[in-house]
Image (cartoon, grey):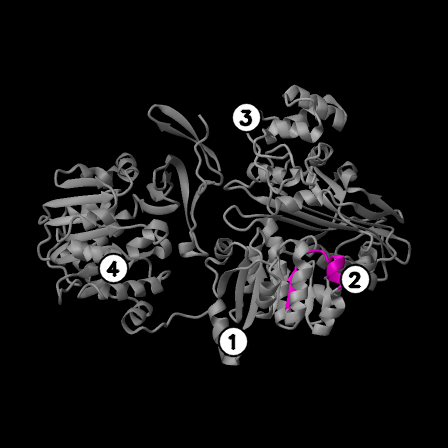
Amino acid sequence: MAPLTHPSIVGKCLYLLHSPIKVLIVLTDGWFREISPQWQGQAMTLKVNKILHVEKSLYQDVLVFESETFGNVLVLDGVIQCTERDEFSYQEMIAHLPLASHPNPKKVLVIGGGDGGVVREVLKHDTVEEVVLCDIDEAVPRVSKLYLPHMAALLSDPRVTVFIGDGFKFLADNTATYDVIITDSSDPVGPAAALFEKPYFQLLHDALTPGGHISTQGECLWLHLPLIEELQKVTRGIFPVAEYAFTTIPTYPSGQIGFVMCSKEPGRDLRTPVRKVPNTRYYNSEVHKAAFVLPEFGRALLKEGRDVLPKFGRAARAIKNQSEGKPVKKVLLLGSGFVARPCAEYIVREPSNELTVACRTLERAKALTEGLPSATAVSLDVLDTHALEAAVAAHDLVISLIPYTYHAAVISAAIKGKTHVVTTSYVSPAMRELDAAAKEAGIVVLNEIGLDPGIDHLYAIKTIDEVHAKGGKVKQFLSYCGGLPAPECSNNPLGYKFSWSSRGVLLALLNSASFIASGQTVSVLGSELMSHAKPYYITPAFAFVAYPNRDSTPFSQWYNIPEAETVVRGTLRYQGFPEFIGALVKLGWLDQSQKPWLVDSLTWAEVTQKAISATDSAESTLVTRIKQLCSFPDDSEATRIISGLRWIGLFSQADKVVPRAGNLLDTLCARLETLMKYEEGERDLVMLQHKFVVEWADGTEVRYSSPSFDRSSNQSLAQQTLTSTLEAYGSPRGHSAMALTVGLPAGIATQLVLDGVLNTPGVQAPYSKEICDPIREILEREGLGLVEKVL
């Protein structure tokens, strides 16, 4: 049987005995992690002994594991619901607070709480004659009976009826029926958000008998105080008595959870119990009274509307900005692709910034701005010149993360509106032609400030300036960068996955390249680029190959190294990638020209037949023709690449092609975006390395890229290899390495332009110390600096 795993638990192999099948459990580091936007920036972790149960029910992800210190743990959609060690504090308080303060509760309804813990506590009251449990997901009581029997056992009590269905409908069908209604809900995310809104509380009110009580899960004072304040306003508009009480519980976020307590009886004292409750572990009459005594920060807001919580971070800066009269800056971000989010997050760190995200598709813009303060989403078509100019003119700065072919239009609009511009793309001839107009308009147009180009410039300029300052000459400059799957995720025939535009990735493979080698300019046609890939050593852990990228020759001037005999900037890929792409090029799959014959009635095999001019679409015929066109060096390589083409589906006689843009390149992109996407739990890798061969005035050659290099302490060494290296991995639960290393530098540069630190008008790139140093210093504080070593 395949290993049983769960994305929230990552380590060792364990065995689960489950009637009567032995199931292998795969963890990674053996810890469960509860991570949620509901408690952003913090997480609960528990050491896992073994996974007991994993399933995807009709409504949610269900996980049960045995922990090292909290017993069995029930987790729904990644959030801890209960543990054997501490569940009693929550179950007792949510049940006994409304029941013990009610004069005679006989009929009780529990919404949610399928684990049975609340029902267990309700039945401790001898006045109770009937309990109905209404839970929408049958999996919760079923699984709880197996793994949490101490909680679920009383679900079979004759006084208990279990109803599997929608709580809203159940309430609507049972008006004026129950003396106490307890809502044991999950957090207000997705469908559960409705359980925290006015219509739900009105249904609760109407389902109560005269004088009835409700108790609902009311979230955490430390995390959700504004939500609790809103719940108080809503419930006080429906019930004559509405209170908030709380309990402590170690495994809930911040160790505290609250309850919204209401009564239909005017003047009812919810704070004082009218009877004792037997056999409790947490609850007693004094704890009942104390549960309503809130810490001052909670009392002040809920009772007086005063916010006395400390202000720090962004909130503190906002107060400071207001006191200093700092003006608001408006930033327009064009594009909502892979790399935009880290850039947007950095921009809104500064509370004086107001961010507008513009995308042709409004929903994509809204998705990007979700959860960001001072951010607005709009729909904008950059091909609509009038709309583009109006949007750009309404902002102080525009960040263009759309395809580079549109940058000249954006810059033209910015010149007209006197709006600064930041892009991550190379300066194209069309962009460079706008330099004079940008200077006349007095605007900064800063480009090439992502990863490559971007971070690579920052450290090339740094080291070259340091070498020159010490009297040295850079004789060779080599810089290679690659955005790749992390090694454990490079599990397809190309050893590659898309962390940015698939079209952009493939088009880059068609670019011609030029570089300087031994003082001579070497040019490579795009169609031959992959054949120039060579093994490239960085560490023994990686089997990289490298090939030149675009035109490296101007960098001898732009980096101020006219003395360099070798100047190469290139791309890193895993071994085997260039040969595979080379085959796709020879087979015509990277062709951008329109193909009138490319229609959706064709199978993939028939499209391949037409692309390579084969006599028919049989796989044997296609393979023979491919071998003729590609001239593989040996049978092993032919088998590898043909197997990969089969994996893509190019020989499929059953699957119909779905053409995109009427050409083979885009149609292939659509296919590969599905096959070569990052799956849940996977991460990417960014590897960037500079190498320098330095000649000093005394003739000594030193391979150099470290600011801490001291020649006087290394006179006895004939040669040294020093490297500047960035090895960055993405987070499966956060940003990809590519998104972070492209988006964050762009965000930093944007803020520096807004602050006036970078203020030289014109179309420019980070080729000078004046631009590079401020960006690099902040980037290093963000943890994205290059590591400089002497090897």
Q: Secondary structure at mark 3?
A: loop
Q: Say which of marks 3 and 4 sits in front.
A: 3
Distance between the Cα atoms at labels 3 and 1?
Answer: 63 Å
Q: Which residue is mark 4?
A: 260
Q: Secondary structure at mark 1?
A: helix
In the image, residue 664 above or below residue 450: above
Q: Nearer the viewer, residue 757 or 439?
A: 439
Crowding at mark 1 (Cα within 10 Å: few <14, some 14-19, many 20+): some
Q: Say which of marks 1 and 2 sits in front.
A: 1
Q: Answer left or right for 522 relative to 770.
A: right
The mark that comes first in sequence, 1 or 2, is 1
Which range is magenta? Answer: 420-433
Distance between the Cα atoms at labels 3 and 2?
Answer: 60 Å
Distance between the Cα atoms at labels 1 and 2?
Answer: 37 Å
The mark that comes first in sequence, 3 or 4, is 4
Crowding at mark 4 (Cα within 10 Å: few <14, some 14-19, many 20+): many
User: Where residue 575 appears, x then y in whole percent?
Assistant: 70, 35
In the image, residue 769 above or below residue 280: below
The answer to whether the residues at label 3 and label 2 have Cβ atoms under 8 Å apart is no
Distance between the Cα atoms at labels 2 and 4?
Answer: 64 Å
The reply to whether residue 777 is in sight is no
User: Where residue 42 appears, x then y in whole percent?
Assistant: 44, 55
The mark that comes first in sequence, 4 or 1, is 4
Q: Which residue is mark 2?
A: 465
The mark that comes first in sequence, 3 or 2, is 2
Q: Which mark is residue 654?
A: 3
Q: Say which of marks 3 and 2 sits in front.
A: 3
